[in-house]
Image: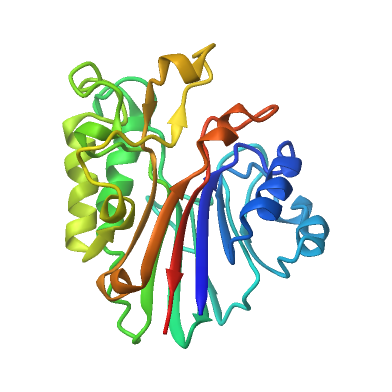
Amino acid sequence: MAFSVSTWNINSVRLRLPLVLDFLRIEQPDMLCLQETKCPDGNFPVKALQAAGYQHLAISGQKGYHGAAILSRLPFEEIDKRRFCDLNDCRHISVVVQAGGKCIRVHNFYVPAGGDEPDPQNNPKFAHKLQFLNEMKTISADTGDGCSALLVGDLNIAPLENDVWSHKQLLKIVSHTPVETEGLQEVCRLGGWVDFMREKIPPGEKLYTWWSYRAKDWITSNRGRRLDHIWGSADLVPALEAVSILAQARGWEKPSDHVPVTARFSFD
């Protein structure tokens, strides 16, 4: 059985609903995990998404900020929302589905961006990000219930040298500072996660999922960062067939500054 999951920071699901519908029509993932939906649960465009074939929705949203949602063609056996840093800011939601005879728990995260100054003493947003990362260390690929696991989302950190356009120039820029990159890699290691994107695309290759709105010609400058990630439990590696980044979505009309990433699996 084939199974696919996509992740996309959509930067307002209502504003960019036509792009979401186009993506679902083109790529047809079994599951789409959205971040930064900026939409209260009651205003989420449920009918349009169900009409597109995604009958099952798990939503955690708030007005104007943050928000995470999972759209699925497969029914949910469980939905869970977790609070981080003692805040109700809608940055996590997880579901359990059955795919190819496997039980899979899917975590969808929107990690805080962290503001502009990488100093937790002077920048509360950066301190929040570091605390959030520390609490993420409790999220394990070993679910304890026999399920496989995926962790996807906008993690707002480009952890490897080739995850940014210039490692040296971005070492003091939020999203690629050593305290962030080392912190995210520790979350991955302690949780027993595998970086599925780098499992298929070697670390020696440049890999981006985000291009700033400030870049007038993002294609030519290509000053990107890999802020969006798909991790999974080690038992899913043999079934992982491909990982793709739909970079052209950055050039769509009124785009998000992030683009969708999709992992495709084949289960016996």
Can residue 95 be spotted in the picture? no
Can residue 198 be spotted in the picture? yes
Camera-nearest residue between 242 and 262: 242
**Figure check: 249 above or below 71:** above
Residue 50 spot, x, y in % from top left: 78, 64
Q: How is the image coloured?
A: rainbow
- Image quadrant holding the C terminus, namely bottom left
Q: In the image, what residue occupies the spot 64% across and 59% down?
A: 28
**Figure check: 35 above or below 75:** above
**Figure check: 64 above or below 84:** above
The image quarter in which residue 79 lies: bottom right
Q: In this view, does 153 lie to the left or right of 118?
A: right
Q: In this view, does 138 lie to the left or right of 28?
A: left
Q: Is residue 101 left or right of residue 205?
A: right
The image quarter in which residue 195 lies: bottom left
Q: In the image, what residue occupies the spot 16% across and 32% down?
A: 178
Residue 92 spot, x, y in % from top left: 48, 56
Camera-nearest residue between 190 and 264: 264
Camera-nearest residue between 229 and 202: 202
Residue 21 spot, x, y in % from top left: 73, 49
Residue 96 spot, x, y in % from top left: 50, 76
Q: In the image, what residue occupies the spot 36% across and 77% down?
A: 148
User: So how many labels did they put on this image?
Assistant: 0
Q: In the image, what residue occupies the spot 29% across and 69% down?
A: 237
**Figure check: 79 above or below 172:** below
